[in-house]
């Protein structure tokens, strides 16, 4: 039987300002992705007849409950 050794790990010191900045940035990027997923409606595409964005995010649209077809 082997002996258990104490594990030493480096402490991560995150200030409140840094944590707030990371949280704000992450929330902004998440909302931007959510906006892009709902942006292209397919039939009323803002990109004309190009449906690449709509097809690329099609399953995500259904998962999030956006109207599709
Ligand atoms: Zn669909």
Image: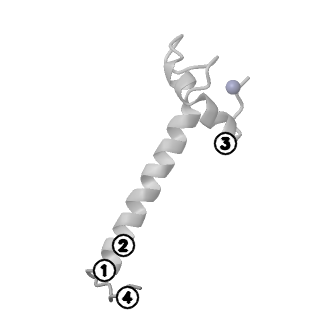
From mark 2 to mark 1, how far is it between C-alphas? 6 Å
User: Pointer 3: what residue?
Assistant: 64
Ligand 1 closer than 8 Å to label 4 CB: no
The residue carrying mark 1 is 15
Marks 2 and 1 close (CB-CB < 8 Å): yes
Which residue ends up furthest to the front in the rendered image?
A: 1
* Badge nearest the viewer, 4 or 2: 4
Tell me the element at label 4. loop
> Are there few (<14), some (14-19), or many (20+) residues within 10 Å of tag 3?
few
Q: Rounded to the nearest whole Å, what is the CA distance between mark 3 and mark 1?
A: 34 Å
Split into quadrants, the picture shows ligand 1 in the one at top right
- List x then y, in percent, for residue 1: 41, 85
Above or below — where is 35 with respect to 26?
above
| Image vertical order of residue 14 relative to residue 50, above or below | below
**What colouring style does the render use?**
one colour
Residue at left offset 47%, top offset 45%: 32
Residue highlighted by disc 2: 19
Q: Quadrant of residue 44?
A: top right
How far apart are labels 4 and 1 at the CA level? 33 Å
The numbered mark, 4 or 1, whose residue comes first in the sequence reads 4
Identify the mark nearer the N-term, 3 or 1. Answer: 1
Instruction: First in sequence, mark 3 or 4: give its number.
Output: 4
Where disc 1 sits, the SS reads loop
Residue 41 at what x, y percent from top left? 61, 25
The residues bearing labels 4 and 2 have C-alpha atoms spaced at a distance of: 34 Å
Query: Which-is-in-front pick, marks 4 and 1?
Result: 4
- Residue at label 4? 4
Q: Decide if residue 41 is on the left or right side of residue 3.
A: right
Q: Residues within 10 Å of mark 1 (few under 14, many from 20)?
A: few
Image point (54%, 17%), residue name: 51
């Amino acid at each position: 039987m082997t002996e258990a050794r104490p594990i030493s790990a480096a402490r991560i010191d995150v200030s409140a300002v840094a944590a707030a900045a990371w949280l704000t940035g992450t929330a902004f990027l998440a909302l931007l992705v959510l906006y892009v997923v709902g942006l292209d409606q397919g039939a009323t595409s803002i990109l004309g007849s190009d449906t690449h964005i709509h097809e690329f995010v099609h399953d995500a649209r259904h998962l999030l409950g956006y109207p599709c077809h």
